[in-house]
Image (cartoon, grey):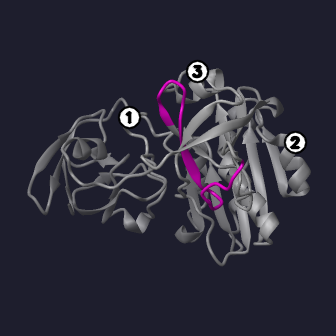
Amino acid sequence: MNDGFSSSAQTLRIREKAEIAAGIFRFELARADGGDLPEFTAGAHVEVLAPNGLVKKYSLCNDPAETNRYEIAVKREDNGAGGSLSLARDARAGDAISVGIPRNDFPLAANVRDFLFIAGGIGVTPILSMMRHLKSSGGGTARLYYLTRAPEMTAFRDELKAEFGGQVVFHHDGGDPARALDLWPILEKPRGRHLYCCGPRPLMEAVRDMSGHWSSAAVHFEDFGATKPAHKPEDTSFRVRLARSGETFEIPANVSILDVLRAEGKPVSSSCESGTCGTCRTRLLSGEAEHRDLVLTAAEHATNIMICVSRAKSGELVLDL
């Protein structure tokens, strides 16, 4: 088993595999004896060990009330690291597969009754579980704006129409930015709702920019690091000093603060590594950061930094580590 894979992983069977949109495959995973699986909550994900030995996270798509199966969707990424490609190409119905215990970095807010969902492409997967949970539990109202290039590239299109009808608005831009959905009328008035967005980073950044007047506690993002912001050509190296130990580290232009500190054996927490979950939030004591996350508010920028993606404008940052 892959060295980075959880020791608590379970061996499941691929009960079904089907191509549900162009290059997108739905997998139904279950125990060989059909018994109950570890429970999960809407928005959760699992790690899956692909046939080629790589591990990748996938959102669970089904209703958490279904206790004997997990449903995931895998987009074939021909230019990716290879985990999704291996699952899409090599995994077959009936195969045994190692699956981690569900974890949720993108939970539905408690005591909220009105939800607005915006999904781009395969980012619909955790939101589908959320909508199914809200429907089966009577937990609140929801509206989904689902953005893709074309109908044939839209995962779960038929299921969403059948299960939720007018609660879902589909928009297909054909890959033309000029035909992108105008999000401002959707986001102009918060109306007490909670907003959940999952999809390509440009979409999440657009949603973040247009929801700046919302309460920061009411806006939630998820992407599992699949759309981690690339290093920019103009990026330069800088120093990070740890205030507690006094140690100083050089951060190269193409390496994150998190990766450098982790390589040096420092106890730093992380999860998504794409600036969307907040796990690696670190106190910034001095220096000017270049913030590239989707979590911190403008008011928090002066004293906090997400070390998985953000960098420095000044020559040195001093962190409370």
The CA distance from mark 3 to mark 1 is 21 Å
> x, y percentage for residue 97?
58, 35
Q: Is residue 116 above or below residue 234?
A: below
Q: Which quadrant of the structure image shows residue 283? A: bottom left
The CA distance from mark 1 to mark 2 is 38 Å
Q: Earlier in the sequence, mark 3 or mark 1?
A: 3
| Closer-to-camera residue (178/300) | 300
* Image mark for residue 158: 2
Left or right side of 59 for 71: right
Query: Which SS class for mark 3?
Result: loop
Of the two numbered discs 1 and 2 in the rendering, the one whose residue sits closer to the viewer:
2
Amino acid identity at mark 3: Asp
- Which stretch did the figure color magenta? 34-55
Amino acid identity at mark 1: His
Q: What residue does disc 1 label?
A: 231
| Closer-to-camera residue (162/227) | 162
How many marks the image carries: the answer is: 3
Quarter of the image for the N terminus: give it.
top left
Q: Are marks 3 and 1 in contact (CB under 8 Å)?
A: no
Residue drawn at point x = 83 percent, y = 33 percent = 151
Residue 43 inside the magenta-drawn segment? yes
Q: Earlier in the sequence, mark 3 or mark 2?
A: 3
> x, y percentage for residue 179?
75, 36
* Image mark for residue 78: 3
